[in-house]
Amino acid sequence: MKMHLCYSKEERTTRIEYKNVKGVEIPVIKYKIYDRFPELVTGFSTRLGGVSTGHLSSMNLSFSRGDDRENVMENHRRFAEAVGYETSTLVFSDQVHDICIRCVDKDDRGKGIIKESDIKATDGLVTNESNTALMTFYADCVPLYAYDPVKKVVALAHSGWKGTVAHIGSELIRHMEEKYGSKAKDIYCAIGPSICRKCYEVSEDVAHRFREEFDEAIYDKLVDEKGNGKFMLDLWLACYYNFILAGVEESHIAMPDICTCCNSEVLFSHRASHGMRGNLAAVAMLKGD
């Protein structure tokens, strides 16, 4: 699988692992920062190795994109086997580009995939229970992973521009602190594959929102003005600063090195496909005994 990288080989924060499932090689994007924690299962999907067709081909993991349900279920079965969890343990988010974060436990397993879910308008999930696999969905927006190896708390959040400007990354860390007793200095974070600065053009009103929410020194690093009311926005760096502002150590944050829009042949990108796409997924789970 060839992929355009946003950083050099020496600076790679991710790697791609392959698992043979039913005679098909399933690629899974992994973050090196989590290699030191054998109790943690994480992964990010590509659009390769599934059974969906057309603009959803082939590893579409969303039931909301007009795909055949059995195709999506088979894609989930394949991805789960490749990463190392059971589909029955999954808990889905219900993303609305807000900053609602929900604590989940064993009673929430299966919600969104094999049983009806009461998790509504929720862009972030947190748990300290093993064998409870959190899953959030993407096609350019930013996946945020967080793990506290001291309290054994894992979290995922979906951070589009609205969530980013509302500091969902900071909210995720505060949620872990308030609900589970985590300390920001103990938490390891990863910012997942998503749209890069050179691909993400926004309007003046969006840039203005970031100017209002971030101090001038940070804002100047996030945004470049193109003229004609257009700006280039660095969501990756904004998410980084949201973690820093919450107290996460700089050395505990892994930046992305893969852009979804630059790699739309192997990753779903809403912008590159003009909305004709499936969904990628991030997953995170604590292993059971």
Image (cartoon, rainbow, N blue to C red):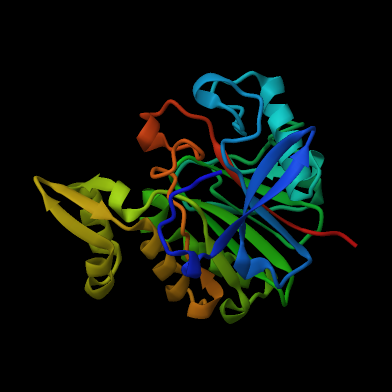
Please state, as top left, top right, bottom left or bottom right, where the C terminus lies in the image: bottom right
167 vs 50: above or below = below
Q: Nearer the viewer, residue 103 or 44?
A: 44
Q: Nearer the viewer, residue 211 or 263?
A: 263
Q: Nearer the viewer, residue 20 or 200?
A: 20
Q: Is residue 138 left or right of residue 117?
A: left
The quadrant where residue 188 appears: bottom right
Q: Is residue 127 left or right of residue 185?
A: right
Q: Position of residue 279 (x, y in %)?
A: 54, 35
268 vs 215: above or below = above
Q: Nearer the viewer, residue 213 or 79?
A: 79
Residue 179, can we see it? no
Give me the residue at 56% from left, 36% from top.
47
Q: Position of residue 227 (x, y in %)?
A: 9, 50
Residue 158, can we see it? yes
182 vs 64: above or below = below
